[in-house]
Image (cartoon, rainbow, N blue to C red):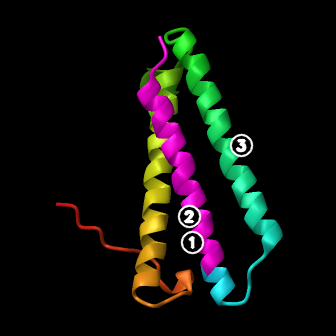
Amino acid sequence: MMDYQVLFNGVLLLGLIVIDIILGSVGSFFQKKFDKVKFFQGIAKAFTVSLCACGVIYIASLTPDIIVINIAGQNTNLLTATQLLIFGGYGKYAVDVIVKLTGFINGKYKTEEIKSVDLNLK
């Protein structure tokens, strides 16, 4: 049976990647370093990665326990490994978007000036 929540999370990952690319492009535009080719390559990459991830999720949901993957000594099936990959990417791009948004809010358009954001989610 298809796990639509995981598929939905893959689509959310696509959204975060696109937002990250747009924020980076706006920052480049303000610095007068905007590269249209790089922008469209980034958008194409985002769609390709998300489409492939959704395809793997679909295939993994059809054969949930046929393929076993060992990740750091822990055996898992293909669907769970794909879920972990999507959530890892989701976390990475979420932090990137927060860092860039923080830069815009603070009036710093150069995203390299802001190395990290202390989210302190305790």
Picture quadrant of residue 101? bottom left
On screen, residue 56 above or below 34: above
Give the residue displayed 56% in from the left and 18% down from the top. Answer: 60
Count how many numbered circles sit on residues in the image. Answer: 3
Secondary structure of the residue carrying numbered label 1: helix
> Which stretch is magenta?
1-26
The residue identified by callout 3 is 48
User: Earlier along the polypeptide chain: callout 2 or callout 3?
Assistant: 2
User: Earlier along the polypeptide chain: callout 1 or callout 3?
Assistant: 1
Q: Which amino acid, mark 3?
A: Thr
Q: CA distance from mark 2 to mark 3?
A: 16 Å
Image quadrant holding the C terminus, namely bottom left
Give the residue displayed 43% in from the left and 53% down from the top. Answer: 91
The residue identified by callout 1 is 23
Residue 28 location, x and y as percent? 66, 81
Residue 70 location, x and y as percent? 50, 25
Residues under numbered marks 1 and 3 in contact, where contact means CB atoms less than 8 Å apart: no
As for residue 22 lying within the magenta part, the answer is yes
Seen from the viewer's position, the closer of residues 83 and 4 is: 4
Q: CA distance from mark 1 to mark 3?
A: 20 Å
The residue identified by callout 2 is 20
